[in-house]
Image (cartoon, grey):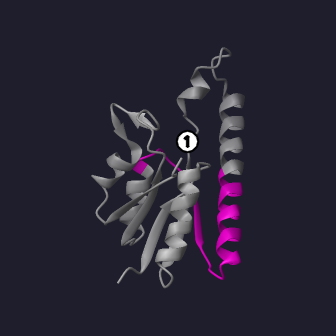
Amino acid sequence: MIRHVLVPIDDSTASRRAFEYALTEFPDATITALHLFDATHPALYADSTGGSVDRVEAFEIRNRERGASLLREATQVAAERNREVETVLHPGTVPDGIVEHATDADVDHLIVGTDGRPNGDRLVGRSVAARVAERVPVPVTVVGDES
């Protein structure tokens, strides 16, 4: 029996579908929505100003606020279905942060969204979902966005 499901949340359609899938398919499980934010994102360093300390702090604050907003949205979606959801906003990188949280939080199933595009969210030819699935010690369900 699945007791605890982890769903990484971002602002993608696939992520929203993965969360909705978890709510529907695991009605008796604890659902945890996880959003990771990374203050060292490469886009910061592509900036022509060179990424000053103030810009790093502003970037991290924006990412925290965006993540908190996404988790509030997930909580609201769960409440509309008479469900509660645990939320975790944590610094970290994808996929490492997902694998770390799934391992440390006594999760027994992971549901992750993927957009299915040939080059979407890929690094060195492998999707984030694939990299997580091969490293996480629990079963993984991959949900696409159907676009």
Inspect the magenta stretch and tell me whether residue 87 lies in it: yes
Circle 1 Cα neighbour tier, 10 Å, few/some/many (<14 / 14–19 / ≥20): some
Residue under label 1? 38
The residue under the point 61% across, 27% down is 44
| Whole-percent x, y for residue 3 in the image | 41, 81
Where the N terminus falls, by quadrant? bottom left
| Whole-percent x, y for residue 25 in the image | 47, 76
| Whole-percent x, y for residue 63 in the image | 66, 44
Position of residue 94 relative to residue 74, above or below, is above
Residue numbers of the magenta segment: 67-96
Residue type of the residue flagged with mark 1: Asp
| Whole-percent x, y for residue 83 in the image | 62, 80
Q: Is residue 35 left or right of residue 108?
A: right
The residue under the point 69% across, 77% down is 79
Local secondary structure at mark 1: loop
Position of residue 6 relative to residue 41, above or below, is below
Name the one closer to the observer, 61 or 111. Answer: 111
Name the one closer to the observer, 11 or 34. Answer: 11
Q: Is residue 97 left or right of residue 147?
A: left
Position of residue 68 relative to residue 63, above or below, is below
Give the quadrant of residue 75.
bottom right
User: In the current view of this chain or complex, which residue is farthest to the top?
Assistant: 48
Position of residue 143 relative to residue 138, above or below, is above
The residue under the point 58% across, 38% down is 39
Q: How many marks?
A: 1
Inspect the magenta stretch and tell me whether residue 65 lies in it: no
Give the quadrant of residue 127.
top left
Name the one closer to the observer, 99 or 110. Answer: 110
